Amino acid sequence: MDKYLLTMRIVLFALITFYLYPITVKSQRHYQLNDTLYVWSMQGAPIYEEADNPGSKIKTYYYGEAARVVDTKIDKHKDNRYIGKDFKFSGAMVKVIMQKDTGYVYDGYLSALRPLNPRSGNRGIQLLEASFGKEPVVTEKTRTSNGQQGEKSVSEYGKNIRYVKELKGNCTVETFTLNNVRLNGAYYFMMTVYSNYFLKDADSIEEPDFTQNARGKYYFTVKSGAERKRITIQKSGNTYEVSSFECELPE
């Protein structure tokens, strides 16, 4: 009888795992059937009639375009893309509707985050303020480990973006905590916020360069004039954190 009960428990566990597995996969993807995603890649997102046929391209949709997921087998056409030697996106070709076109798009170019305003002419936190409106800021005084006075301010932008700015001596640390995104979403958010894509008077492109992957923590640098900023992306629980570090040299 004990062996029979043990066998039945194992079978029951296997059945539960089998039926819950697709839900787990969708949870990892952060989207499911009928969800709306948005193009975040500045190079655009090509849409294809067939998932496995590069020659079936319909057209390319660009930053901010909406895509409604109509795929019931999201992980059927898995596809990995590399940004750098040690920087890989794990994704899939997913069936979507974009305007009047129905086809397959690489989901690594898409994010559930609402796109920012490309006409704002801003970058950094000013870009978020122009896109979401200026949010209430909570500020508190802090003290660094070596006794220097500092300041910390916190604000929220929508349901999925939390912004923290810390002044530590002559250094400024910014951290965006992003909910409901994967690594690709955090990457394209970082590229959009810290590049000069939307600046109207820019005469050349300034965007973060990937430098290394240190055990899942991704490092970038971006130069703006004479200034150089260090940026990192790392997973923190169910969120991703995009942080930048910048220090003023003493005069």
Image: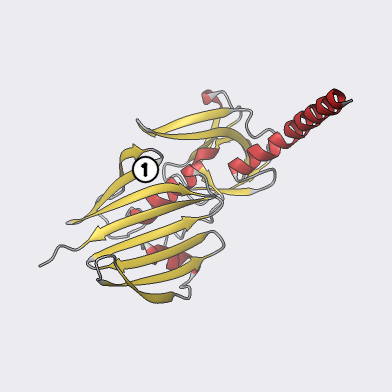
Q: Nearer the viewer, residue 61 or 247?
A: 247
Q: Nearer the viewer, residue 14 or 53?
A: 14
Which element is circle 1 on?
strand
Position of 157 relative to 82 (above/below): below
Quadrant position of the C terminus in the picture? bottom left
Residue occupying the point 46% across, 73% down: 134
Position of 98 relative to 92 (above/below): below
Residue furthest left in the image: 251
Quadrant position of the N terminus in the picture? top right
Residue 165, image x, y percentages:
37, 66
Position of 28 relative to 244 (above/below): above
Reading the image, the residue beneath label 1 is 218
Residue furthest front in the image: 2
Question: Does residue 249 appear to the left or right of 177 in the view shown?
Answer: left
Residue occupying the point 47% across, 43% down: 183
Q: Nearer the viewer, residue 144 or 60?
A: 144
Position of 173 relative to 23 (above/below): below
Residue occupying the point 27% across, 60% down: 201
Residue occupying the point 32% across, 44% down: 219
Check disc 1: other Cα within 10 Å, few if <14, some if 14-19, many if 20+.
Answer: some
Q: Is residue 123 visible?
A: no
| Residue type, mark 1 in image | Tyr
**Snapshot quadrant of residue 216:** top left
**Snapshot quadrant of residue 210:** top left
Residue 156, image x, y percentages:
50, 67
